[in-house]
Image (cartoon, rainbow, N blue to C red):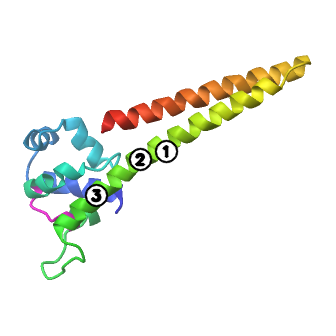
Amino acid sequence: MNQLTTGRFIAQKRKEKNLTQEQLAEKLGVSNKTVSKWETGKCMPDYSIVKHLCQELEISIAELMDGETKESGNTGTFNEQQMIAMLERIQRLEKQKHSLLGIVLITMGIALFAVSLTFSGTAFRDFISGLMLGLSIGEMLIGVFLIGRSFRKQ
């Protein structure tokens, strides 16, 4: 599944239906910027909207994922419900990945903070200690941001 190929396919099918991005967005209950992001390959449609998108474009979910029209005799390995469930799991795993990365960054920040406390004495050691302290605070802030963002999306 290639996001760019899928995006081009969405744009092609939308144009074949003589729909603007805004008209398609209105039918799906999303913003036209969201449709634009799909078509440019910046993101994929959410699993909750995939079925409705496919109905509007008169394509199957397999065609959407592959980014090309299938021959009528060509059947896929998975049915549409399985594909939607798979998309849901993928999106849930992406959110969990960001949470896990946030936790790792916070842990590394705490460890670096503890190490920074052991350095002192000379001007150079104080400089290294301050540098590690700054890095630890930065890591912890980024970790908190990632965890907060993943909870906000849920």
Pointers 1 and 3 in contact (C-beta within 8 Å)? no
Q: Residue 147, how many percent across, how many down?
A: 44, 35
| Residue 91 in the image: above or below residue 121 | below
Q: Which-is-in-front pick, marks 1 and 3? A: 1
Q: Residue 111, how many percent across, how many down?
A: 68, 34
Q: Depth check: 26 or 18 in front?
A: 26
**Residue drawn at (77%, 24%) of the image:** 117
- Can you identify the residue that label 1 sits on? 100
What crowding class fits label 1: few (fewer than 14 Cα within 10 Å), some (14-19), or many (20 or more)?
some
| Residue 13 in the image: above or below residue 122 | below
Q: Quadrant of the N terminus?
A: bottom left
What crowding class fits label 2: few (fewer than 14 Cα within 10 Å), some (14-19), or many (20 or more)?
some
Q: Residue 68, how many percent across, how many down?
A: 24, 67
Q: Depth check: 127 or 8 in front?
A: 127
Find numbered disc 1 in the image and state the secondary structure of the residue it sits on.
Answer: helix
- Using residue 8 as the reference point, say whether residue 134 is left or right of it: right
Find numbered disc 2 in the image and state the secondary structure of the residue it sits on.
Answer: helix
Find numbered disc 3 in the image and state the secondary structure of the residue it sits on.
Answer: helix
Mark 3 or mark 2, which is nearer the start of the sequence? Answer: 3
Q: How many labels were placed on the picture?
A: 3
Q: Which mark is residue 87?
A: 3
